[in-house]
Amino acid sequence: MLPKTARSGRKLLRRFAAEAIDIYPTPTRPGNGFSRVDLDRLLDDQFVTVGEHARGLGRRVRVTELGHAVLTAHSEAADHG
């Protein structure tokens, strides 16, 4: 049984799965259109991980196997619902 996710969480997961997104440790860097609270929730649920800091690139957000499973399950449910 997969954990329940809010629509906003799935939307953010799809975005992380579709494109390479880096986060930065300083507030002077531009945001990527999502809140730290949303990211923390996905991290707590183990749907994403954050890689090591790469010089000049920030830290890459990666969708975990569990995160991909949630996306697949909701995609299939939408196809059948």
Image (cartoon, rainbow, N blue to C red):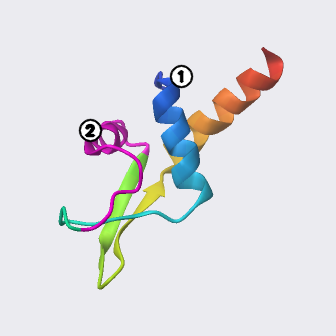
| Nearest to N terminus: mark 1 or mark 2 | 1
Picture layout, residue 48 above or below residue 10: below
Question: Horizontally, is 69 left or right of 50 in the view?
Answer: right
Picture layout, residue 54 above or below residue 45: below
Q: Is residue 36 magenta?
A: yes
Q: Residue at horizontal 31%, vertical 36%? A: 41
Residue 57: horizontal and vertical position, in percent?
A: 36, 78
Q: For the residues carrying marks 1 and 2, which lies nearer the camera in this image?
A: 2
Residue 64: horizontal and vertical position, in percent?
A: 48, 51
Identify which amino acid the numbered label 1 is placed on: Met
Residue 30 falls in which quadrant of the image? bottom left
Secondary element at tag 1: loop
Q: Which residue is mark 2?
A: 37
Q: Is residue 60 magenta?
A: no
Q: Residue at horizontal 35%, vertical 67%? A: 51
Residue 15: horizontal and vertical position, in percent?
A: 55, 49
Number of the label disc, if any, that sits on residue 79: none
User: Outermost residue toward the bottom?
Assistant: 55
Residue 24 falls in which quadrant of the image? bottom left
The 10 Å Cα crowd at callout 1, few under 14, some 14 to 19, many 20 or more, is: few
User: What span is in magenta?
Assistant: 29-47
Q: Which residue is mark 1?
A: 1
Q: How many marks?
A: 2
Q: CA distance from mark 1 to mark 2?
A: 25 Å
Identify which amino acid the numbered label 2 is placed on: Val
Question: Horizontally, is 73 left or right of 44 in the view?
Answer: right
User: Outermost residue toward the top?
Assistant: 81
Whether pointer 1 and pointer 2 mark residues with C-beta atoms closer than 8 Å, the reply is: no
**Near-viewer residue (73 or 25):** 25
